[in-house]
Image (tube, rainbow, N blue to C red):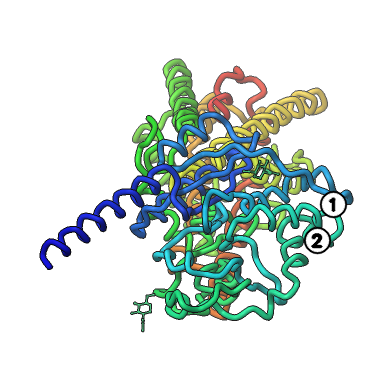
Amino acid sequence: MAWLASKFGFLAVLLALVAAGSGERSGPEAYVTLLYGDEFLLGVRVLGRSIRDTGSEKDMVALVSDGVSDFAKKLLQADGWKVELISLLANPNQVRPKRFWGVYTKLKIFNMTRYKKVVYLDADTIVVKSIEDLFQCGRFCANLKHSERLNSGVMVVEPSATLFEDMMRQVNSLPSYTGGDQGFLNSYYADFPNAHLFVPNLSAENSRPQPEMERLSTLYNADVGLYMLANKWMVDEKDLKVIHYTLGPLKPWDWWTAWLVKPVDVWQNVREKLEESLPGTGGGRNPNDQLLVNILFALPICALLFCYYRYRLQTNDDLSCTFSRSSLYDYARRIYYKFKSSSGSPSYSGVGVASSSTINPNQQFVNGTSRLPVYLGAVSVFFCFMAAILSLTLAFVIVPRQVMPWTGLLLMYEWTFTTFFIVFGCYLELVYQWGKTKSRAGALFASNDSSDYDSEKGHQRRTSACDIVTWSYGTGMALIAVIAPSLPCVLGITALFANFICLYRLGLMVAGGIVLASFMSYASEHLAIRSFVRGLEDRDLPRSRSISLVC
Ligand SMILES: *[C@@H]1O[C@H](CO)[C@@H](O)[C@H](O)[C@H]1NC(C)=O
Ligand SMILES: *[C@@H]1O[C@H](CO)[C@@H](O)[C@H](O)[C@H]1NC(C)=O
């Protein structure tokens, strides 16, 4: 008996070895994904890591098309993917042939005949719990989404040459509501909505016949779009197996998504764990992006240092304007006077003329204000908002999309503020020059207009007209701009447009925006008038001092 047992044991070991050997070359089962271009590379990397994190040892195959770079292929191989080149499958749907070129390529997974069964996952999915049981599913399994249509984001497929050829034959005749593979599959498996639900434990019994099609539960393809609608998963969160980030501009690898969609945390956590399989790729970093990020971080800081340097150079020969204690003291004194003279009541008038004279009570603006163009305020407000929109857009375009959420946010702020202050500073400088020309022209008519400027007063004005006002307005704007969008975040906002509580939070954001907008209007108008009046008064002064405004 013992001899027999040992013999069988030996046989079992031999069989296991053979099985392992064949699995080494190409296992009978595999996870498969598709990559059309480098944009989804990070998604595939995270997906692979998430599959391995669930303890799976199965093959992972990435079908890559021509649009994928060599670096991406090498990186995927280093990450443990089997990379297979495929040619795009022509789109027979001639209505929109260009845009949807290659969308039928997904059907090629039905032709992966060296595998007995494959689990296909889109690059924008992530596995949060083992899905090995999916390999027990029928010949074709997918998930039903809205309006009884199957979603091709997660599929279990039994590859077969005959099936694939049959599909290829029908590709030209069957309609496709999406113009792509998903629509085609819905037509090809027209009876799919009637398929039974796949129950893992039932299927485990090998006795039952392999069903043609089976429906997968939502747990295998949990749509983030549905989460966004209700601000919670409709199913028990701890049962989730695959999360599918379907929302178009909110892909999990774009840095802003993490700030808007809560379930992206899961994805980001896996991303941070990505190994450095090639130099500089740890944590899902892209070596090229990394260089760009460093430059983008350094550039505004260098600009700032340069400005400061020039500023110091100027103030060395023109001692009137420094951040020394005297100017701070002066500023404090002015604020004191302002409160004393206005006796607490807000002094802002619609035109902003009165406010500029009350904020700087020891400046004699009365001459200048009479010659202020009436539309200066409105133009300044308009320009301020245009500058803000321009800088936001520029920052958004310039920041690489797939950086870490914090990096993206910081870069965004850095570039928005820098651009805004440079653009608006240039505008103020223009207004200042305008005021100067206007003043010269005015001087022809009334030559004794500025006769009250004795040297003592002029000196006093120059001392107090330090850019500290400009700076404080700028800082104020920056502070509100940071606080307004982060208010809901601080209060724990997770979804922007969901239930009642979120409406309240959205309201908070809107309120913050309104505060910011009002402050921007006020500050831009005030600063412009200030620059203009200074220009009026400075016509005899050398130009150099004004430069500190813009650097
Ligand atoms: C399908 O697979 C077979 C065998 O692997 C291959 O010869 C054939 O070219 C494939 N068809 C397409 C359209 O890729
Ligand atoms: C059903 O399957 C789960 C794993 O999917 C397992 O934990 C559980 O014990 C199984 N139940 C039965 C009755 O086999």
Q: Is residue 135 above or below residue 10?
A: below
Dividing the picture into quadrants, the one containing residue 13 is: bottom left
Quadrant of ligand 1: it is: top right
Question: Which residue is at 44% across, 79% downward?
Answer: 236
Residue 25 position within the rendered picture, expressed as x and y whole percent measured from the top left: 42, 42
Question: Which residue is at 37% across, 39% downward?
Answer: 282
Q: Is residue 110 above or below residue 428?
A: below
SS for dot 1:
loop
Measure the alpha-carbon separation of dots 1 and 2: 8 Å
Is the Cβ of the residue at disc 1 closer than 8 Å to that at disc 2? Answer: yes
Type of amino acid at the residue the image marks with label 2: Ser
- Mark 2 nearby-residue class (10 Å; few <14, some 14–19, many ≥20): some
SS for dot 2:
loop
Dividing the picture into quadrants, the one containing residue 171 is: bottom right
Dividing the picture into quadrants, the one containing residue 222 is: bottom right
Residue 467 position within the rendered picture, expressed as x and y whole percent measured from the top left: 51, 35
Towards the viewer: 247 or 133: 133
Q: Which mark is residue 93?
A: 1
Residue 500 position within the rendered picture, expressed as x and y whole percent measured from the top left: 57, 80
Q: Examine the rendering and report whether any part of residue 529 can be seen.
A: no
Residue 107 position within the rendered picture, expressed as x and y whole percent measured from the top left: 68, 53
Q: How many marks?
A: 2
Q: Is residue 516 above or below residue 225?
A: above
Type of amino acid at the residue the image marks with label 1: Asn
Judge left or right: residue 304 versus residue 5: right
Q: Which mark is residue 176?
A: 2
